[in-house]
Amino acid sequence: MTAAATTLTDTVLEVERLTIDLPSKGEPIRVVDGVDITVARGQVLGIAGESGSGKTMTALALLGLLPSGAVTGGRADFLGKDLLRLTTKQWRATRGDQIGVVFQDPMTALHPMLSIERQLTEHVRRHLDLSRHDARDKAVELLRRVQLPDPVGSLRSYPHQFSGGMRQRIAIAVALACDPQLLIADEPTTALDVTVQAGVLRLLKQLCESIGLAVIVVTHDLGVMSTVADHLSVFYAGRIVESGPTRELLRGPRHPYTQGLLDSLPHPERPDQPLVPIEGAPATPANRPSGCALHPRCAWAEPSCSQQVPELLSISASRLSACPVDPFGGGER
Amino acid sequence: MSVLELHDVSVTYHRKHLPDVTAVAGVTLTVERGQIVGLVGESGCGKSTLGRAASGLLAPSSGTVLFEGEPVTPLGRAPRPARERRIQMVFQDPNSSLNGRRKIGEQIADGLELAQAMPSKQRKARVAELLEMVGLDAKAAERYPHEFSGGQRQRICIARALSADPSVIIADEPISALDASAQAQIANLLHDLAKQLDVGLLFISHDLAIVRHIADVVTVMYLGKVAEYGPTASVWDQPLHPYSDALIGAVLHADGSADMPEALPGDVPDPADPPAGCRFQTRCPAVMDRCRVDEPALVPVAGRANGRTVACWLHES
């Protein structure tokens, strides 16, 4: 889906100038600093970044699961309501109902002592007010939708009887139980083996397209992003440094950080090319460098980079980058 | 003589009220000095168990582990024989393998002390040297683990392993817990150190793409057995075992192509109850009748003189 085809009514979530401050011994620490994201029906938005980039905190803010004492700013418009201003009671009717969530480790997301039927129906009955019988039918339908081999037989099984990939499918079924409009998946395949990873990614992509779900995938893995995300936002030290359609962005990154991340990955096609890591360690929110947070690690940094925080500016119809030096801007584009 | 030789090693775990699990079922493997051996496979294939048996952290149920030609004593209550301290390990999580309450320098000096007693001035100088070898400032010796990032902590773990003057290092998923940029740094560091110091490196990883970059030879394990072995480039370019093929095919490319690799059907079977015949037959896209009955042996590939072996009936000579 191109940006132009996304009409206003398709937009499910629109986040503007999101800031998150976490309490600490001294001054509160700003872990997310002015983030804008938009997701539409049938679209997968990828949020990429390393540890400390604020990607997980952003996801938690959209789920009302920030640690206590966290202070948010900006707004997060989800189908007419501002997620940053919901009460605990309102969250109970939103999270798990209109917004589904899938976490990294399906073993900890599912209750080990409850049957799959119980985990799926309890949820459905509470939120959708269905009878026991209807809820059971719904559970079978959900398991079929996530392509579990034996949906009816699986209802009486327990999480430990399934493999990691199947457990993650069940966790996705739980997340979809109440027909959410938005699904947030935090590192959904990081704990899975490579050979089953593809199946889970394919499923997420299919669900997004077939039921018009808006999906946010949070991961550090650009390979995962390349396969599932339509649109990608790259986070560094609490800010978005670059965003755009995944294909364009990965094929011609414009921000030195995105380029650096790609250079540090093995190229399956060019295995003899050495890995070129980004020097140094990721900036931490408590110890963010002045100006552009990347400047101490950036080969293209100019004196002004350490003074002024660069704005995320439009570089083409659908792309944004926060690098005034723009070392890769002159070429093909 | 190889620095590390494993001959037909099996490791069986005994469980209360449950059937035994043979996590490693007869693996033969060698590591030469200065050679990087990649050991790849999915979770539950026995690669970590094999690494632990190779280092003497656990005793093999059968088979032998030789370090510089002599059998390795499995770790017990007695101190390790001094000779075997030259087998070192680097683990996945640097946070749990460093002591958070001790200075970096002291932790690295432990290894030096074990290798040979030396005056404290000389010890300090050697610690500084080791820190610089792994790309850290010598002043890091006076600091504590929490003051470092994950990648830097893994460098400290590598420095500590080097302090015992190892001739082989067994690294079990040494980069999996690190950030993307740190992964490349640590992979490059391990590669360069192995080559410069002429240390053998057994690099255990689930990430084939990184193994392709740094390993000289690769061993692909499936359900406790070796499916395929050979020079990394050759195996990568032309995988012979359908399992190697599937693993390589499952690597995601961050090139914006949106190519979705085919997922391998099914899951890794329960190692306590491996399938009859070939262990991969339940998931193999090229399965034949024979595969369900007879187990293929790991044999050299006919007609190719590049030292490759494969356990698959498709490549019977």
Image (tube, coloured by chain):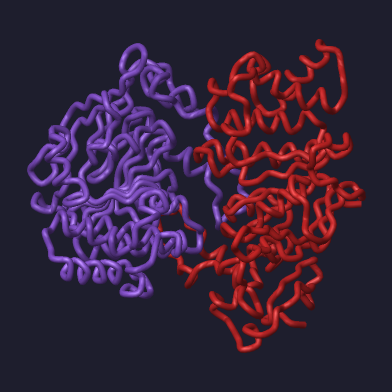
Question: Which residue is at the far bottom?
Answer: B289
Could you say where residue B76 lies in the image, as x and y percent from the top left? Answer: 79, 41
- Residue in the foreground of this view, choosing between A117 and B312: A117
In the picture shown, does residue B173 fall above or below B111? Answer: below
- Is residue B198 among the parts visible in the rendering? no
Residue plotted at (19% across, 59% down):
A124
Total numbered labels placed on residues in the image: 0
Task: Answer with the quarter of the image where residue A239 lies.
Answer: top left
Q: Is residue A209 left or right of residue A24?
A: left
Residue plotted at (58% across, 33% down):
B96
- Is residue A300 among the parts visible in the rendering? yes
Q: Is residue A202 left or right of residue A79?
A: right
Could you say where residue A62 lies in the image, as x and y percent from the top left? Answer: 23, 40
Could you say where residue A77 lies in the image, as x and y percent from the top left? Answer: 13, 40
Image quadrant where one finds the C terminus of chain B:
bottom right
In the picture shown, does residue B36 fall above or below B128? Answer: below
Task: Answer with the quarter of the image where residue B29 lies.
Answer: bottom right
Residue plotted at (31% across, 66% down):
A146
Q: Is residue B174 left or right of residue A264?
A: right
- Residue in the foreground of this view, choosing between B195 and A248: B195
- Residue in the foreground of this view, choosing between B71 and A327: B71
Which hue is chain A drawn in?
Answer: purple
In the picture shown, does residue B20 fall above or below A64? Answer: below
Could you say where residue A217 lies in the image, as x and y percent from the top left? Answer: 33, 49
Q: Is residue B130 left or right of residue A298?
A: right
* Chain letter for the part of the structure drawn in red: B
